[in-house]
Image (cartoon, rainbow, N blue to C red):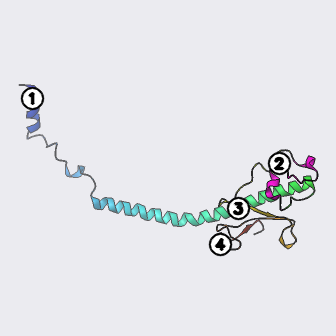
Amino acid sequence: MSLMQLFLRLMIDPARPDSRRRKKDERGFTLTELMVVIFIIGLLATVVLINVLPSQDKAMVTKAKADIATLESALEQYRLDNLTYPASTDGLNALVAAPPALAQPERYRRGGYIKKLPQDPWGRPYNYQAPGANGKAFDVWSMGADGAPGGTDENADIRSEE
């Protein structure tokens, strides 16, 4: 018996199940089953997003308040060393490098008071004004998500005392 005859005999053997047909339990998923699974995954993703997105807004406000507290602490250190707060014209940059108009530059802390000025969670610089409103020595604030003065909720201005 030649090799070819042996091969054909094995292929046509009636006792052997047809290799070209799959058993019913070995077939793939139907389109309906796949659509149901995709729908359930989409539904779960929607529920998760609805619960997570408000937390992100709260986290951004909390980060802004923490950054403002850090900047205020650095401003206090600046005042202790230089006997005054930076002028509004020098801004928060005075915490990173000595302002050119500083009365006694030798009192300025070597390396600055912070390494790098943070940006608010929405990618904008923090605002600084000296003297501040309501008799305060200075004000540091973020304009919030909308970048405009005032607003409500996540668009409200963020100050440390709030």
Q: Which residue is mark 1?
A: 4
Q: Quadrant of residue 80?
A: bottom right
Q: Main secondary structure of the magenta part?
A: loop
The amino acid sitting under disc 3 is Ala
Q: Amino acid at mark 2?
A: Gly
**Label number found at residue 64:** 3
Name the mark on residue 153.
4
- Identify the residue shown where x is 88% and y is 71%: 135
Label located before the other in sequence (3 or 2): 3
Q: Mark 3 to mark 2: distance in Å? A: 21 Å
User: Which type of secondary structure does the marked residue at label 2 adopt?
Assistant: loop
The alpha-carbon separation of the residues under discs 1 and 4 comes to 81 Å
Packing grade of label 3 (10 A; few <14, some 14-19, many >=20) is many
- Are the residues tagged 3 and 4 within 8 Å (C-beta)? no
Give the crowd class for mark 2: few <14, some 14-19, many >=20 residues within 10 Å. some
Q: Residues within 10 Å of mark 1 (few under 14, many from 20)?
A: few
- Residue found at x 54% / y 66%: 51
Q: Residue at x 73, y 58 (%)?
A: 67
Q: Nearer the viewer, mark 1 or mark 4?
A: 4
Mark count? 4
Q: CA distance from mark 3 to mark 1?
A: 79 Å
Q: Residue 35 falls in which quadrant of the image?
A: bottom left
> Is 115 contained in the magenta span?
no
**Discs 4/2, front:** 2
Q: Is residue 39 left or right of residue 139?
A: left
Read off the residue under disc 2. 112
Q: Which residues are magenta?
A: 88-109
